[in-house]
Amino acid sequence: MIAWGMFDKAFEDFLTAVLAHTGNAYKGWQFFSFEQRRGIFETELPLCFAEAPTIMALLKDLIADSYPLQIKRNVLVHGTITLQINPERPLLIATGKYKKQEITETFTSDQIDDFYYAIIHLAGRMAQFVRPDAVGFVPPLPSTEISLLQAVLSKNPTPQSKLSMISARPRPSPE
């Protein structure tokens, strides 16, 4: 699930910048589960962007959208997968656990595509907050909020997400 990795890297880059800006430290947070890092993010967000209600709202929506995708992704990646073949429509059935509760997700080929696109969209939404050069493309923000976002991002020691690195990677020349 490369798409989730792109989102997760952009999320980690942004959280790094937020923590550098607030000055708060969580020992070893980079090794925490996504759920734990998301909790840190939700705690730190108001400390960093209290004066930026538009950014707060956009990031809260983004993180809320990550919840169901994370659960589905974990069941698909870490669960048991079975394939049900029938003449009308084959199904991929993934069964796993989330917080000790068994979860089953059933996917048609179209639903797998939709799931992939939802994660890629989430990764793109997160990447637009991580890349200082993309700040102008974030949904309309007041100029004071753009300045704050740029100040926060300037504190990130690793400002390039995998998403931007992949798009900037030169293509090999055909031989």
Image (cartoon, rainbow, N blue to C red):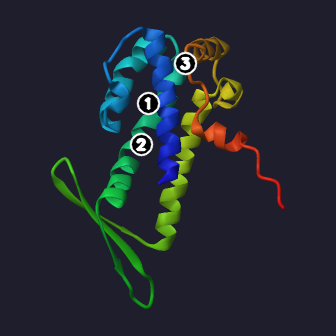
User: Whole-Å distance between the Cαs marked 2 and 1?
Assistant: 10 Å
Regarding mark 1 in the picture, which secondary structure is present there? Answer: helix
| 76 over 64 or under it: above or below | below
Residue of label 1: 60
Q: Does the rendering let one see residue 129?
A: yes
Q: Residues within 10 Å of mark 2 (few under 14, many from 20)?
A: many
Residue denoted by label 3: 156
- Please report whichever mark, 2 or 1, sits nearer to the chain's N-terminal start: 1
The amino acid beneath tag 3 is Asn
Q: CA distance from mark 2 to mark 3?
A: 22 Å
What type is the residue that disc 2 sits on? Ser
x and y percentages locating residue 50 in the rendered image: 45, 12
The residue mark sitting in front, 2 or 3, is 3
Q: Quadrant of residue 137?
A: top right
- Which of the image's four quarters has the C terminus? bottom right
Specify whether 34 is left or right of 121. Answer: left
Amino acid type indicated by mark 1: Lys
The quarter holding residue 164 reads top right
Q: Residue at x 53, y 64 (%)?
A: 113
- Label tally: 3
In-front residue for pair 37/31? 31
Residue drawn at (43%, 42%), measured in percent from left and top? 65
Q: Mark 2 sits on what residue?
A: 66
Q: In this picture, is 102 found above or below 65?
A: below
Residue sitting at 54 percent across and 42 percent down?
123
Does residue 139 appear left or right of residue 168 in this picture?
A: left
Q: Earlier in the sequence, mark 2 or mark 3?
A: 2
Lower sequence index among marks 1 and 3: 1
